[in-house]
Amino acid sequence: MYSHTTRNITVTVKPFYLEEQSEPEDNHFVWAYRVTIENGSEETVQLLRRYWKITDAFGRVQEVRGAGVVGEQPVLKPGEAFEYSSGTPLPTPSGIMVGTYEMEKPTGERFDVDIPAFSLDSPYVSTVIN
C-alpha cells in the first residue's frame, strides 16, 4: 500500500495485478488499483479533476487528465472518505503511476493533492540484482 498526505488530505493506493485480464504472450498486462481519499482537514473539499502520469518499464509515459474519478466529483466533509477502484493496462510487465487530484474548497480556492507514486509489478518482472 502507498500513502501520502497533502494539506491533511490523505490518498492511499493499493495496486493489484489482474492475471485473468492479462495476456503476457501479447505484451498486455493489466492492473487494478483501489484508491481511498480521506479528508482529515477542517474544511469540506470537492475533487474536481485528476491527473495521472503512467510510465512503463521502457520509460514511455502516458498522461491522463480528466474531470473527477470514475464519473464522480465527490464532496468530502471533514472526516469523510471516498473510495473507488480503477485500472490500467501496460505493454510491459511493470511500471509506475503517480499523479494529483485538483481539489476545491467552498471558498473557491483550488489546490492539488499528491497521489503517491506506486509500483505496478507482475509475476513476469525479471529482477536483476547488481
Image: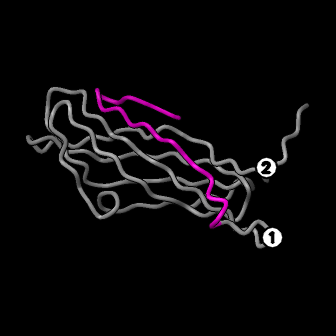
> For numbered disc 1, what is the local secondary structure?
helix
Quarter of the view holding residue 19: bottom right
Report the span colored magenta: 1-21
Residue 107 position within the rendered picture, expressed as x and y whole percent measured from the top left: 8, 40
Residue 8 falls left or right of residue 13: left
Rounded to the nearest angstrom, the CA distance separating label 1 from label 2 is 13 Å
- For the residues bearing labels 1 and 2, Cβ distance under 8 angstroms: no
Q: Residues within 10 Å of mark 2 (few under 14, many from 20)?
A: few
Q: Is residue 114 above or below residue 96?
A: above
The residue at 36%/54% (across/down) is: 50
Q: Position of residue 56 (x, y in %)?
A: 67, 55
Residue 124 location, x and y as percent? Answer: 79, 53
Any mark on residue 25, and which?
1
Q: Amino acid at mark 1?
A: Glu
Residue at 62% across / 61% down in the picture?
Answer: 30
Q: State which quadrant residue 7 falls in.
A: top left
Front-lying residue, 22 or 54: 22
Q: Residue at x 50, y 50 (%)?
A: 33
Is 6 included in the stretch rendered in magenta?
Answer: yes
Disc 1 packing (10 Å; few <14; some 14–19; many ≥20): few
Q: Secondary structure at mark 2?
A: loop
Q: Is residue 87 above or below residue 3?
A: below
Whether residue 88 is in magenta: the answer is no
Front-most of 68 and 110? 68
Residue 109 at x, y = what percent? 16, 41
Q: How many marks?
A: 2
Q: Earlier in the sequence, mark 1 or mark 2?
A: 1
For image coordinates 29% across by 64% down, the residue present is: 71
Label 2 sits on what residue type? Val
- Is 26 positioned to the left or the right of 32 in the image? right
Residue corresponding to mark 2: 125
In the picture, measured across the screen, residue 58 lies left or right of residue 31, that is right
